[in-house]
Amino acid sequence: MSISLVILAAGQGSRMQSDLPKVLHKLASCPLVVHAMRAGRALDPERVVVVVGHGAEQVAAVVADEDPQAQIVTQPEQLGTAHAVDQARGALVGQAGDVVVLYGDTPFIRPETLEALQAARAAHDVVVLGFHAADPGRYGRLVANGDRLERIVEFKDATEDERAITLCNSGVLCADRAVLFDLIAEVGNNNASGEYYLTDVVALARAKGLSAGIVTCPEAETLGINTRAELAAAEAAFQAQARRDAMENGVTLQAPDTVIFAQDTFLGRDSVIEPYVVFGPDVTVESGATIRAFSHLEGAHVSRGAVVGPYARLRPGAELAEDVRIGNFVEVKNAQLGEGAKVNHLSYVGDADVGARANLGAGTVTCNYDGVFKHRTTIGEGAFIGSSTMLVAPVTVGAGALTGSGSVITRDVPAGDLALARAEQVNKPGLGAKLMDMLRARKAQKNKG
């Protein structure tokens, strides 16, 4: 059976006290709405519809970057969740199968939970995701009769007996497309908030003789983000789980609480992560690699046996082959380093191809930007780049070539050659001592004054 996703992402999130739409705040370096999109991807949806409102253009741009095929519809006024889902009606005309409704501010729902929700549709016309709350608070309550869901009651409209129920509504549901939109057409706003509640479709379905069921999940999966404090708590929960998962999968974290993961960080078995390492988005570290303390990686691939850091920065496009060595205070960006290459100290390697076993001395810089365009540097296999060499791109240093320390290389260096590009040194006998005496005298005179 085909699946369509409708993701609600129109809210302003006023309690975040932010100019940024709530669903674009990041958890584990990933916008909240993207977490929802990636969870829903487990259902292999034929269509994804994202309902936007506040900050519509910003949200739409992030959605398109994650999934160019996703359809964007706008909810011009926020009149409730049923009204929000109804904005997707036109985008799903003629689409057979089920619709799963997700929320752009609820990042922790697992793919397995959504699969269970969709599987339950075989027995029910409408299926709702619920959870048993330790503190039900102001959640909507699921009123059930045995294993049948009768209705959902919002806290504002609930009686004292209904508020005593601990089985709560996550807001996530699954139903046949035609059934869902027929029910939404009958939803009214005669309630304490004057809004069109999606939750009303359950009672409407039961009144038509349709069945409604419940799938439950742990409360932690349903955590919604409404404030900065809740975002921080969610970040802490994500990081704690990511660290546990990494160690259970054979990764050594020397000081787990100091390591920060992104949503998509992948660490191979027997990799070693030292303290205070930060992983940004799109990082893969293969088995047996070591990331040393105080390093920051994003958009990087580190192969088996490589060592990075301490105090290293790998930026997007950094590709390290096996047994590469990246040392302290080295930055690599949009560069490929071949097997066994070494950049051990105080260097910048950007927009470059570095051959296997090449060695870049301390202070090497690939000067890749002319103020308008980026240019590429190529360093051949086994080349030796002397300390403080400036490689002014576009430039190529051939295999086995050497550059003298302090050189500014502006022309290609053929394989096996030695390139020296610096002014001739001139020594002036005794002038150093005379100059220092003069400066000290001038300072003494100034202090007297």
Image (cartoon, grey):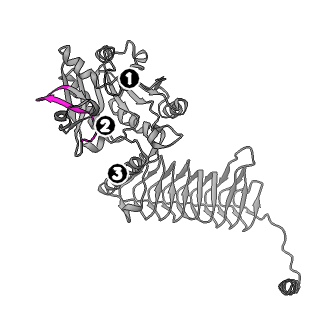
Residue 111, image x and y in percent?
A: 31, 37
Residue 142's x, y, as percent? Answer: 21, 31
Q: Which mark is residue 237?
A: 3
In this view, 206 is above or below 438: above
Residue at the disc numbered 1: 85
Kindly report the distance in space between the C-alpha atoms of the residues bearing marks 2 and 3. 18 Å
Q: Nearer the viewer, mark 2 or mark 3?
A: 3
Q: Position of residue 33 (x, y in %)?
A: 43, 36
Residue interval drawn in magenta:
136-150
How many residues crowd around disc 3 within 10 Å: few (fewer than 14), some, or many (20 or more)? Answer: few
Res. 62 in view: yes
Q: Is residue 144 magenta?
A: yes
The amino acid type found where label 1 is placed reads Val
Residue 234 on the magenta span:
no
Q: Which mark is residue 111?
A: 2
C-alpha gap between disc 2 and disc 1:
21 Å
Which amino acid type is shown beneath numbered disc 2? Answer: Pro
Label 3, secondary structure: give it. helix
Of labels 2 and 1, earlier in sequence is 1
